[in-house]
Amino acid sequence: MDYLIQDFRAAYAELRGDRLAETLRPDVQAYPSKLLSVWGRGNYRDVKGDLSFLFYNNLPRSGLSISRDEAAGWIEVYLAYWKALGLILAAEGIRDNDQSSWEKVYEAWKDLTLQIIRGYTNHDFENWTIPCLYIAGKYLRQFAIRADEERKNSNEYSDAAVMQDDFDPESEEHKLLEDCARHLNRIFQTCLNDRAPLEESRKWGIYYAINLLFKTYFKLNSASLSKNVLMAISAGRGDMPTLDKFPKSQQVTFKYYEGVLSFLEENYVEAEKHLTMAWHMCHKDAKRNLELILTYLVPCHLLTTHTLPSPQLLEPFPRLQRLFLPLATAIKKADLRAFDIALRDGEDEFIRRRIYLTLERGRDIALRNLLRRVFIAGGFEEAKDGAQPVRRTRVPVAEFTAAVKISGGEDIDSDEVECLMANMIYKNLMKGYIAHERGFVVLSKNGAFPGTGV
Amino acid sequence: MIPVHSMSWAESASPSLQAPSYTYPSTMSPAYTPVSVRQGFGQAYTPQSDYYASSTNSFNSPTMAPSSSDQQPQQQKFDWPDSVRSYVQRSFQSSNVDPSVSDTEIKAKLKETIRYTQDCGTMYTTDWDNMPLPQVMIKTQRRQELMQSAAAPPTVAESDRPTTVSASSNPKKRKSSDLSGPEPLGTTTVPWRSGKTLEDRITKPSNTMDSPLAAKSKFQKNAEKRLRRGDGGYQSTYRSPSPPLPTGPIVGLNENLEKRYLRLTAAPKPSDVRPEHVLHKTLDLLKKKWRKDGNYNYICDQFKSLRQDLTVQRIKNEFTVSVYEIHARIALEKGDLGEYNQCQTQLRALYRAGVKGNAIEFKAYRILYFIHTANRTALNDAIADLTAAEKEEIPIKHALSVRSALALGNYHKFFQLYLDVPNMGAYLIDMFVKRERLAALANMCKAFKPDLKLRYISEELGFESDTEAAQFIIDHAGHDMLQERPDHVIFLTGKAGQLFEEARAEAFRRVDLKGQI
């Protein structure tokens, strides 16, 4: 316990929240022996005694003012921490004990989290100590994930799968993570509902909490719960400090999730705004984060501006190159068949990242490019006296049909081609109209293909 | 006559198995075919309009299922088998002590567990050596209660569609169902699961295209979502108050083939439950009756009670699968998406647990269903779930083609696919055919000028006849858009554009599809 006590004293003296949080970090990989010594001999009474000494004797004597109320809160926190630590050390195999499991660890850490939350609601913890909440939340999530995995691999799980009539494999898979989500929500609420003036407010922890929540909800596949968080934040906007006042890392993460959420709802204009912001703010060395942002920004851009990523953009990201370049090339070359193949090849990965449904709309762009070529290939009409020569605007449907057949590599009837063209016109990718009876498409003289210079 | 749904299903006053005195509130725009609790045979189906005493989430007051022991004569002197004695001993052993569970709690739980097996007559057959200890049961229970009471923000549910009014008399399509009375289904909720159905997360209110009132209360959506998650009701009562019950399932003794459906509020008496061999005969009887009479309310009621009997006896085999499949198909035929969904959920769990059935057929239905509700996330996940081999199976391939045709607005291809749908998928597609027609017409109005032959439209959009096509146009754009020519009728695309655009926006708004960019 000595380590802990020293660290606590030091951190508290300097009002360093981050150092204080370090006293609660259960990083057994990094410093196992230190944590083992905190665990000591596993004697609860000893530990309780040590802590009481720290708070009721030692601290006051060294001149650190801490109210009895707050002290009581911290004692509970550290007791819970100590208990959890014992289980963690056992589960990691550093300590000999077969009573532990990740599920037990999760439960114990949950207790710790609740104690910390209570510290803020009941024991008057000050807001500079907020990093403790972060650490609790962060590890709560990690332990939940580990515990869920452990459950999945246990016998009990497979037995239950067969035995219980109400067993729903999907719901059981993330049982603890869902529980964790609820507690993270409480952390969020604790930050949100603080009425203290801004300098002392817990509101400063809000984006950290939100990002934790987002991560969890995304893993749980729950976009609507995420939306609720967004709504809560915009509702409480009045006295909430604006996003730009928070640390950049939190801003980037938040914008990223906001962007992805909009993206998933097909709100591509919104999504693009958020993701672009995240992209600009993101640190240039945070390769993984940049990659993630681009994964959604590229398809988004494709739909909003009909443009493709340049090779230079994708150069530092080989994974994205593999994903997007074949598609981009096919679209540029107006090669429908290549597009279909590229889409099918990448299907699994696209689906995993939930961008498949967006990317498939790229086919429209490819088709547009194809029709444009037919238009251009049609050449110019005779110029009226003095006027500029104008491209032939009356294109037989048959020509389009032929083009689609060649590009797509398979047969297609002209009715379907007309349907595809109707879509082009409807989506403003092509301007004109179809004279069905005569078998012609009449394109607009000015800007038949908006945005492409023709 | 617009009632309000309550957030959950309150328990009826008396937790007995006798006919509960509750009924369910009616919905104003039912998204599913509600089925009333039949009060007796031979009566005509009458809508009930009693209101439901609403209460808040009352699942927090668990009625211990085995507390029916209170109704039993007290203290039957039993000679307890050794396995039971040793179970009791183990519960109190120091090595099994759990600090969070007190001795009193253990004693109470022991009493309850043992009494229950006595009531079911399974005390001697239960495997006490492998029975979870009372401490474990209590903790599981606590966890469940915590999840129930934890506030999960209400989520917007994907919901079911109402039955569409199919104007055609095609034998393959059924007539508009008798949605006469506002009758919700008798299912209970799984309140703590409101955070789940994670895949349905993203979307959006139901399409109540055919109903005059679009707004759906949030609760309604949740209720529908619960229904869709579909335990069929009796299961959740069974599970929530008590921990996973001991290994011995009930074995029924009821020899009657038919049985009306009653929602369970406590453990059922074996004398009420039909054993499996009786249920087989019941299924045969029901099949005959369905073919002969076609009385959906009766059939649905009977099927629900059949499913219930299977559940309480823990029968999860191919027979169970076939029961759910048959009910699902009947529900589809009748456009009862609520019931269909319950069955679909159960089937999915059964298939995943390895029970054989027509998994391919139903996977294809799932895809079509998600297209209908425009649930992108679920669709994405459903596709992710498919193996490469499955994607080549005809029903699934068809469903995927429908999806991709619609994604790009290829109405031509879509309606061609509509002409020939494997299995009963056509009934699902029926649900959204109208909105796709509106979309197609909006497209065509903008692209084809100045007019189009009616014949072309009716062929492109899969109408049964020119007359049907004409009727559709008139319904949405009035008579002026059609004009007669010497030997055919034309549709004035130029003028009708705006009208169809609005109709299209309306139809898709209900399902909250963001249009295409």
Image (cartoon, coloured by chain):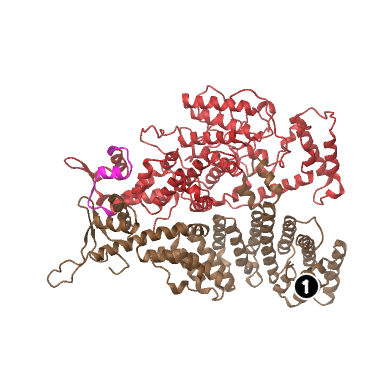
Chain colours: A brown, B red
Quarter-of-image position of residue A85: bottom right
- Rendered-image quadrant of the C terminus of chain B: bottom left
User: Can you say whether A333 is above or below B346 in the image?
Assistant: below
Residue type highlighted by circle 1: Phe
User: Can you say whether A40 is above or below A228 in the image?
Assistant: below
Quarter-of-image position of residue A426: bottom left
Tell whether position B465 is magenta.
yes
Q: Is residue A386 left or right of residue B246?
A: left
Q: Give me the residue at 69% from left, 63% from top.
A: A139
Q: Crowdedness of circle 1 by 10 Å Cα count: few (<14), some, many (20+)? A: many
User: Can you say whether B397 is above or below A239 in the image?
Assistant: above
User: Can you say whether B336 is above or below A194 in the image?
Assistant: above
* Residue B428 x, y percent position in the rendering: 44, 41
Residue ranking furthest to the top = B42
* Residue B366 x, y percent position in the rendering: 50, 45
Tell whether position B350 is magenta.
no
Comparing A92 with A200, the one in front is: A92
* Residue B415 x, y percent position in the rendering: 35, 45
Q: Chain of mark 1?
A: A
* Residue A425 x, y percent position in the rendering: 30, 58
Q: Number of numbered discs present?
A: 1
Question: Which residue is the site of mark 1?
Answer: A8
Start and end of the magenta stretch?
Answer: B447-467
The answer to whether residue B162 is seen in the rendering is yes
Give the secondary structure at mark 1: helix
Comparing A43 with A91, the one in front is: A91
